[in-house]
Structure formats: C-alpha cells, structure tokens
Amino acid sequence: MEMKQIANLLFEVRILKDIVRSGYAFLGSGKESVAEHSFMTAFICFAMARIDQDINSEKLVTMALVHDIAEARTGDFNYVEKKYSIVDEAKAISHLTKHLSFGDDIKNLLDEFNSGETKEAKLVNDADQISFILELKKLDDTGAKGPEKWLPVILKRLKTETGKQIAQSIMETSWDEWWMNDYSE
C-alpha cells in the first residue's frame, strides 16, 4: 500500500513543474515554475554544504527540496496575494503526508525551515533568495526592466555570511560569463 501512496506523492510533487511562480507577473519579465525554483534552491544548498562543512548537508539539501512542496496544493502566492488570501500550509502538508511512513520527516523539515532558527534553515532561506537573485541578475544583464528595483530588496533578505558571499559573487559576475570562459572555435 505504501508504494501507491509514494506514487501519489510523486504525481503531486510533479505538478510543481506546472505551477508558475506568481511574482514574475509583477516583475514584468521572466518566468519560472515552482519545481525549477526548488531544484535551483536545492543545488545552491548542495554548493553551500561544500563551503560550510559544519552543517548537516543531507538535511540542508532535503529541506531545500521540500521547502515549497505545499504549493502543490496551495499554489504560489506572492507577497501581494498573501495580503488578501489565507494559505493553510500546515493543512496542505498534513494532507499531503498523512499516508506516508516518512510524512513526519517532511513535516519536521518544513517546521524547521519555517521557524528559521537552525543554521540549516537560515542557509536554506538564503538559498531560496539566492535562487531569485540569480534570475533577477540574468534578467538585469539581458536588459529587462524591473530587476534593478528588486535586487537591492532581495539582497537585504540574506542572513548568513555564506549566503551574502555567494550573492556578492553573483552580483559581480555576468550571467553568461561561464559560457564565454575558455571560448575557442
């Protein structure tokens, strides 16, 4: 029976590929699915775990991977929409995990992330912001209007030294520099 519940969970999480992050509509350019954002956040955490080895790297990456999983049921609400709508993330997570033997693992990771008190939670929160910074920097580098207003706001959200150092390096690097490194024909 557990395999059927896991299959349902995987289909539910798969829907995150189809849910577009809502903030880009207000930005006026760019787009990204919740799944794309979660992947990028998890990969940033993978890199962070190599920089700061005094953390639980499995917890860090796993927390990043599930940090927006409730959005499979709630959708993605930006800060304006949250002023007028009530999102019951706890209820969504409770329903999403209730038939899974490892459901408490997901709930505990999300509780820790949302409390923002542990070193891992702070790093994942920073990675969440850095994922957005990467998108904004690319849009800014390619001439889109709007990112120049948002970048300073998002940069101020960073809490950890590791997050701030990564963000500073991103801001000092052209989004396509990696492509042109060692270019030859």
Image (cartoon, helix red, strand yellow):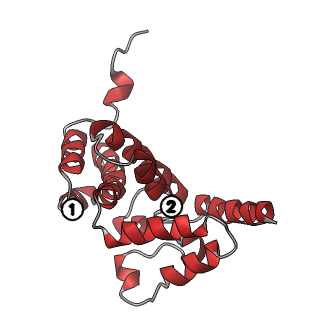
Gap in angstroms between the C-alphas marked 1 and 2: 29 Å
Task: Report the quarter where the C terminus lies.
Answer: top left
What amino acid type is highlighted by mark number 2? Val
Quadrant hosting residue 100: bottom right
Q: Nearer the viewer, mark 1 or mark 2?
A: 2
Query: What SS does tag 1 mark?
Result: helix
Query: What SS does tag 2 mark?
Result: helix
Q: Position of residue 37 (x, y in %)?
A: 46, 55
User: Which numbered disc covers residue 16?
Assistant: none
Describe residue 155's horizontal placement relative to residue 64 as left or right: left
Q: Residue at x 33, y 56 (%)?
A: 120
For the residue pair 137 and 112, the one nearer the viewer reads as 112
Q: Residue at x 27, y 35 (%)?
A: 174
Task: Report the quarter where the N terminus lies.
Answer: bottom right
Q: Report crowding for label 2: few under 14, some 14 to 19, many 20 or more residues within 10 A (C-alpha).
A: many
Q: Position of residue 153 (x, y in %)?
A: 20, 64
Q: Residue at x 34, y 14 (%)?
A: 182
Q: Which residue is mark 2?
A: 66
For the residue pair 130 and 159, the one nearer the viewer reads as 159
Is there CB contact under 8 Å for labels 1 and 2? no
What amino acid type is highlighted by mark number 1? Lys
Q: Residue at x 51, y 53 (%)?
A: 36
Q: Position of residue 10 (x, y in %)?
A: 69, 59
Q: Report crowding for label 1: few under 14, some 14 to 19, many 20 or more residues within 10 A (C-alpha).
A: few
Most extreme residue toward the top, as rendered?
A: 185
Q: Which residue is mark 1?
A: 149
Q: Position of residue 113 (x, y in %)?
A: 38, 66
